[in-house]
Image (cartoon, rainbow, N blue to C red):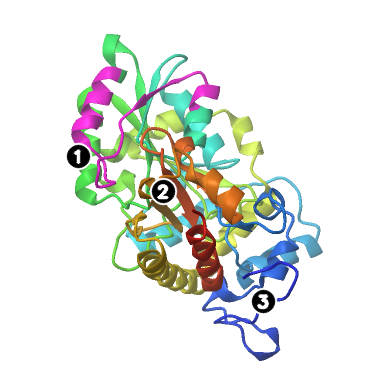
């Protein structure tokens, strides 16, 4: 059993002498090393709990990020952010990975993706207007939408975990009844299912949005976390997507949640909307965050490739383990993200199996009901860890009866 009281044996990717292979960041750290961290993932629960819940990765920082931060701190470069450094770095990454030409003049720095989402919603909707969501979906969508005085209209995903376009049309029609403005908060790739929306799906979304007068705000924070075999399509590149607004960040793909920064990007027809963003919003991002994110996007490609390979291995490992140890659990390997959405209804553990796994198995997963309609009986499992931790987690889950 994995135990925080002892040092785990070096896993794959750890060389003799403790040196790590940069091609395998997921296997670079022992459990003892991870338990010395002070972030929420490692401090919320007691040491006997194996935490595979919140979206933090069990990895060391990519070396270019460490170097950029160390250099900035050494010279005392810890003031306020300025310029288009982040936008230029994202533009280079997007051109190389997604064939997307981003105009830095149609971007704005924001404190993080969710605060950026709120600011975008303020630009295109008013108090009491509707925001359409696709549950099961990232729980803060509900919280932030409510906090900014908008109401939620749900358009649940289909049984296949993909966008239900007929249901989306119904939701758009309901949201705009009476001439109200409305927005659609698109999660792309989708959290928690890992679904990567296709160009055809996103083009159909744009057509529906145009038909009903709904503005699309796309959370694309997981965009770099799509491996070979699937392809991320930026919403602003599809026909009809030019009046959309997108939020992107290096936060998820390079484990930089504690270094706050994100970018809002406007399609050509939404540039005037983004220009109305209050100037003080740009005071929120961390200057060190922007330095770190820019280094990740510009110089972190090799590290990211190793991460994606490790995540692909972990997806397959989890499938094999569940088939062997928990065959009643439904699992569709995600096309993107480092999150797995597990259907545990066949285990008869009630609406919130995560609570049972925590109490009886001492493994922390995310609670399905928090993700809205369709979440009951499910858990979200974080794959961004060493393979041995995935094995241990499934062992603990299987021991729960």
Q: Residue at x 70, y 89 (%)?
A: 17
Separation of residues labelled 3 and 1 (CA atoms): 49 Å
Q: Which mark is residue 103?
A: 2
Query: Picture coordinates of residue 179 (x, y %)?
Result: 29, 11
Residue denoted by label 3: 8
Q: Nearer the viewer, mark 2 or mark 3?
A: 3
Residue denoted by label 1: 204
Q: Is residue 308 above or below residue 115?
A: below
Q: Residue at x 22, y 24 (%)?
A: 170
Taking the view exactly as shown, the residue that stands out farthest to the bottom is: 16
User: Which residues are the magenta region?
Assistant: 145-174
> Which of disc 3 and disc 2 is earlier in sequence?
3
Look at the numbered discs 3 and 1 and tell me whether their residues touch, using CB distance below 8 Å: no
Look at the numbered discs 2 and 1 and tell me whether their residues touch, using CB distance below 8 Å: no
Look at the numbered discs 2 and 3 and tell me whether their residues touch, using CB distance below 8 Å: no
Q: Is residue 159 or residue 112 the one in the foreground? A: 159
Q: Which mark is residue 238?
A: none
Q: Nearer the viewer, mark 2 or mark 1?
A: 1
Q: Is residue 339 above or below residue 267?
A: below
Taking the view exactly as shown, the residue that stands out farthest to the top is: 178
């Amino acid at each position: 059993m994995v135990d925080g009281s002892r040092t785990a044996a070096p896993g794959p990717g750890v060389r003799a002498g403790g040196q790590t292979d940069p091609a395998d960041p997921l296997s670079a750290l022992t459990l003892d090393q991870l338990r010395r961290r002070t972030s929420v993932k490692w401090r919320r629960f007691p040491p006997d709990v194996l935490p595979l819940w919140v979206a933090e990765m069990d990895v060391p920082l990519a070396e270019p990020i460490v170097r950029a931060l160390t250099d900035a701190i050494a010279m005392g470069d810890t003031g306020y952010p300025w310029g288009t450094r982040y936008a230029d770095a994202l533009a280079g990454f997007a051109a190389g990975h997604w064939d997307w030409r981003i105009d830095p003049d149609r971007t704005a720095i924001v404190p993080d993706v969710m605060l950026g989402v709120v600011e975008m919603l303020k630009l295109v909707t008013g108090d009491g207007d509707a925001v359409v969501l696709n549950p099961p979906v990232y729980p803060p969508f509900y919280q932030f939408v409510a906090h900014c005085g908008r109401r939620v209209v749900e358009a649940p995903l289909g049984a296949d975990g993909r966008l239900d376009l007929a249901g989306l049309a119904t939701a758009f029609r309901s949201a705009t009844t009476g001439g109200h403005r409305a927005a659609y908060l698109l999660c792309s790739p989708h959290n928690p299912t890992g679904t990567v929306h296709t160009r055809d799906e996103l083009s159909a979304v744009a057509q529906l949005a145009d038909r009903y007068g709904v503005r699309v705000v796309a959370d694309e924070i997981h965009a770099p976390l799509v491996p070979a075999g699937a392809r991320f399509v930026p919403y602003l590149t599809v026909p009809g997507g030019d009046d959309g607004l997108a939020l992107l960040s290096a936060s998820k793909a390079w484990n930089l949640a504690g270094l706050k920064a994100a970018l809002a990007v406007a399609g050509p027809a939404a540039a005037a909307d983004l220009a109305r963003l209050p100037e003080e919003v740009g005071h929120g991002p961390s200057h060190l965050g922007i330095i770190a994110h820019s280094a990740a996007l510009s110089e972190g490609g090799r590290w990211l490739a190793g991460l994606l390979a490790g995540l692909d291995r972990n997806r397959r490992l989890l499938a094999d383990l569940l088939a062997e140890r928990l065959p009643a659990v439904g699992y569709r390997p995600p096309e993107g993200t480092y999150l797995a959405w597990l259907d545990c209804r066949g285990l008869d553990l009630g609406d919130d199996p995560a609570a049972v796994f925590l109490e009886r198995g001492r493994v922390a997963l995310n609670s399905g009901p928090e993700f809205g309609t369709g979440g009951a009986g499910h858990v979200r499992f974080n794959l961004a860890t060493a393979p041995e931790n995935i094995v241990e987690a499934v062992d603990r889950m299987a021991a729960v009866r």
